[in-house]
């Protein structure tokens, strides 16, 4: 089976729309968190990291976006950032390009607003029918494919903070199963009042201090020879993605340690090869367990740690996709070098751990 590489990526982050704002924000060590206007956002958080001045009309266009929610707009713009890279392939055989997009529960705001209108209106059916499609989980992936004429397999993945890594793992299986020639995969998450309250009530007390963020990141995953033939630089080889469940308070560290060791072995990388580590983090016990697990799995290694969550907040479903984007942004235009590796990790509080290993080509 051909070696799969990431040959292009597109990010929308609280630093701005596009790859360069993320690259600059990380290089400067700048926080994207800002105070929220309580008059505009009645939420339990005082700070958040929002994509500045982002609207569907501004970045997608006014035509056909009147009812497009923020999550869908973020996804459409992020996917659009990669379409130019594969324009020739899309024009020739659009059915050979797949899209795997991760999300939390779709647009929480759209779901709750639509439900409220059906309960508070004079009649339950006095709702805006054009907004109903926003309530389904695969709205963002479907609209992204329609907007950019991607006609291959279209999949929506949801898995909490590990969604980005789960989407990557699914993309690998989709290609290796012979269903497509290349995959655009990633994840998106929006900020909204509704999501803020759900997150607040769903967190443990020690986790409530982490502000929320939003954003999206999408990657072009394809065989190394296809990237070379098209003149695209192989930024990193996708070595492995691994996941494992844990139970109880003592399980995360051990589960993630086993996960990382297995991914390194599958990728053919040694602990000392790891140049970058991008942990989910976020404070609290799980963050400490995550960091200790990585240290256990990389004895004697001294990687550079990219702590994105401290700068852009909790981006939930988009978190691990943005961590992966942060690795590529930090690695530079040529990507990981020969003999180098990068590790992206996460612990989901609902009982799952995951990681991905990228290597130089």
Image: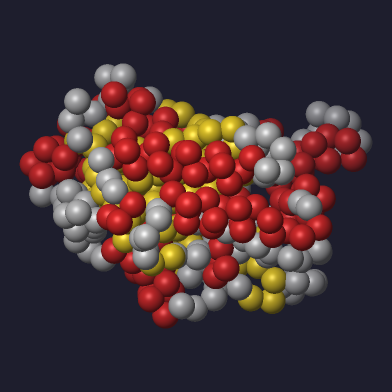
Task: Give coordinates of residue 4: x percent, y percent.
Answer: 24, 37
Task: Give coordinates of residue 181: x percent, y percent.
Answer: 23, 29
Taking depth in this image into account, of 131 and 288 the one nearest to the observer is 288
Q: Quadrant of the N terminus?
A: top left
Q: From the viewer's perspective, is residue 79 above or below residue 96?
A: below
Furthest-left residue in view?
229
| Residue at image point 49% right, 78% down | 30
Whether residue 225 appears in this view of the structure is: yes
| Residue at image point 68% right, 65% down | 211
Task: Give coordinates of residue 263: x percent, y percent.
Answer: 38, 39
| Residue at image point 80% right, 72% down | 39
User: What kind of colouring is applied to the model shown?
Assistant: secondary structure
Taking depth in this image into account, of 111 and 12 the one nearest to the observer is 12
Taking depth in this image into account, of 198 and 154 the one nearest to the observer is 198
Whether residue 79 appears in this view of the structure is: no
Taking depth in this image into account, of 124 and 260 the one nearest to the observer is 260
Residue 243 located left or right of residue 9? right
Residue 258 located left or right of residue 40? left
Task: Give coordinates of residue 49: x percent, y percent.
Answer: 60, 67
| Residue at image point 69% right, 76% down | 35
| Marker count (numbered) | 0
Furthest-front residue in view?
300
């Amino acid at each position: 089976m051909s070696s799969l590489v990431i040959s292009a990526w597109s990010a929308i982050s609280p630093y701005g729309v596009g790859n360069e704002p993320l690259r600059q924000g990380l290089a400067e060590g700048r926080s994207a968190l800002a105070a929220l206007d309580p008059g505009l956002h009645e939420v339990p958080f005082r700070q958040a990291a929002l994509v500045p001045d982002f609207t569907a009309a501004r970045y997608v266009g006014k035509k056909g976006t009147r009812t497009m929610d923020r999550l869908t707009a973020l996804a459409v713009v992020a996917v659009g950032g990669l379409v130019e890279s594969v324009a020739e392939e899309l024009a020739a055989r659009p059915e050979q390009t797949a899209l795997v997009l991760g999300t939390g529960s779709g647009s929480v705001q759209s779901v709750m607003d639509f439900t409220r209108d059906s309960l508070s209106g004079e009649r339950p059916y006095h709702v805006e029918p054009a907004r109903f499609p926003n309530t389904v989980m695969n709205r963002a992936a479907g609209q992204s494919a329609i907007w950019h004429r991607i006609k291959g397999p279209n999949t929506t993945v949801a898995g909490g903070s590990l969604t980005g890594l789960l989407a990557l793992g699914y993309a690998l299986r989709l290609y290796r199963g012979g269903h497509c020639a290349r995959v655009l995969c990633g994840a998106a998450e929006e900020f909204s009042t509704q999501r803020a309250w759900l997150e607040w009530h769903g967190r443990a007390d020690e986790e409530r201090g982490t502000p929320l963020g939003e954003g999206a990141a999408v990657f072009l995953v394809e065989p190394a020879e296809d990237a070379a033939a098209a003149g695209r630089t192989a930024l990193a080889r996708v070595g492995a993605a691994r996941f494992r469940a844990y139970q109880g308070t003592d399980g995360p560290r051990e589960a993630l340690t086993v996960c990382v060791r297995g991914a390194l072995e599958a990728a053919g990388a040694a602990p000392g090869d790891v140049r970058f580590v991008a942990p989910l983090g976020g404070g609290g016990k799980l963050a400490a367990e995550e960091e200790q697990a990585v240290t256990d799995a990389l004895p004697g290694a001294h990687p550079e740690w990219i702590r994105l969550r401290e700068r852009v907040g909790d981006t939930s479903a988009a978190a691990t996709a943005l961590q992966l984007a942060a690795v590529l942004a930090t690695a530079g235009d040529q990507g990981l070098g020969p003999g180098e590796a990068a590790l992206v990790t996460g612990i989901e509080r609902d009982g799952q751990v995951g990681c991905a290993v990228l290597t130089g080509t």
